[in-house]
Amino acid sequence: MRGLTFVELARYPFCVAVSPRHDLARAKKVRTEALLAESLLGYTRKDYPDYYTEVEALFKDNPRKPVFAEEHDSVTSLIAGIEASHGVAILPSCVACLAGPRLRLVPLDPAGPLLIVGVLVQAKASALVEDFVQTALSATPSPAN
């Protein structure tokens, strides 16, 4: 990592992704304990172990732990499972750009972790890399505080 700098581009809060037909789709916020009664969908544990670390941290104060009904190998597969009413998932808000009206993303209460998106650049990056970073910074929303 020597000689590399992390440049943060955006932060996205985790939300509950539900089908627009789901009862939770009308909620303004969803309490994490309410998710324990739902069929949870997630990514494949083998390929996305950090996803489970983040999700399980949401339930750290609850004696009951989440049980996942399905695991999916991609975000598109996960979106399709939610849309087909197989369950709900905890996903970052940036999934909205892929899902569009197929899903409703409801904020968590209390707010969960943030997905921080950025790039690693060399300390002495070329002008082309610097231009890329500046373009990416101007094209993304301001990071949440």
Image (cartoon, helix red, strand yellow):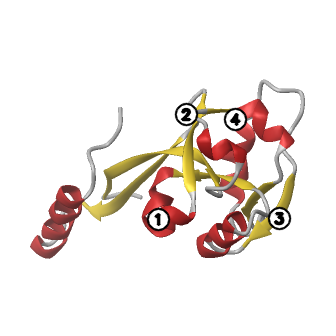
- Image location (x, y in percent) of residue 120: 34, 61
> Could you give the CA–CA distance between mark 3 and mark 1, rounded to whole angstroms?
22 Å
- Considering every residue shown, the one lying at the far left of the view is 127
> Could you give the CA–CA distance between mark 2 and mark 1, rounded to whole angstroms?
18 Å
Helix, strand or loop under label 1: helix
Q: Earlier in the sequence, mark 2 or mark 1?
A: 2
Image position of 122 (left or right of 92): left
> Could you give the CA–CA distance between mark 3 and mark 2, rounded to whole angstroms?
26 Å
Helix, strand or loop under label 2: loop
Q: Which residue is mark 3?
A: 70
Can you tell which of label 3 and label 1 is closer to the viewer? Answer: 1
Q: Which residue is mark 4?
A: 58
> Could you give the CA–CA distance between mark 4 and mark 1, rounded to whole angstroms?
25 Å
Residue at 61 percent of width and 29 percent of height: 109
- Image location (x, y in percent) of residue 36: 83, 39
> Could you give the CA–CA distance between mark 4 and mark 3, rounded to whole angstroms?
19 Å
Q: Quadrant of residue 106?
A: top right
Q: Which residue is mark 2?
A: 28
- Three-letter amino acid code of the residue under disc 3: Glu
Q: Earlier in the sequence, mark 3 or mark 1?
A: 3
Residue at 34 percent of width and 61 percent of height: 119
Q: Residues within 10 Å of mark 3 (few under 14, many from 20)?
A: some
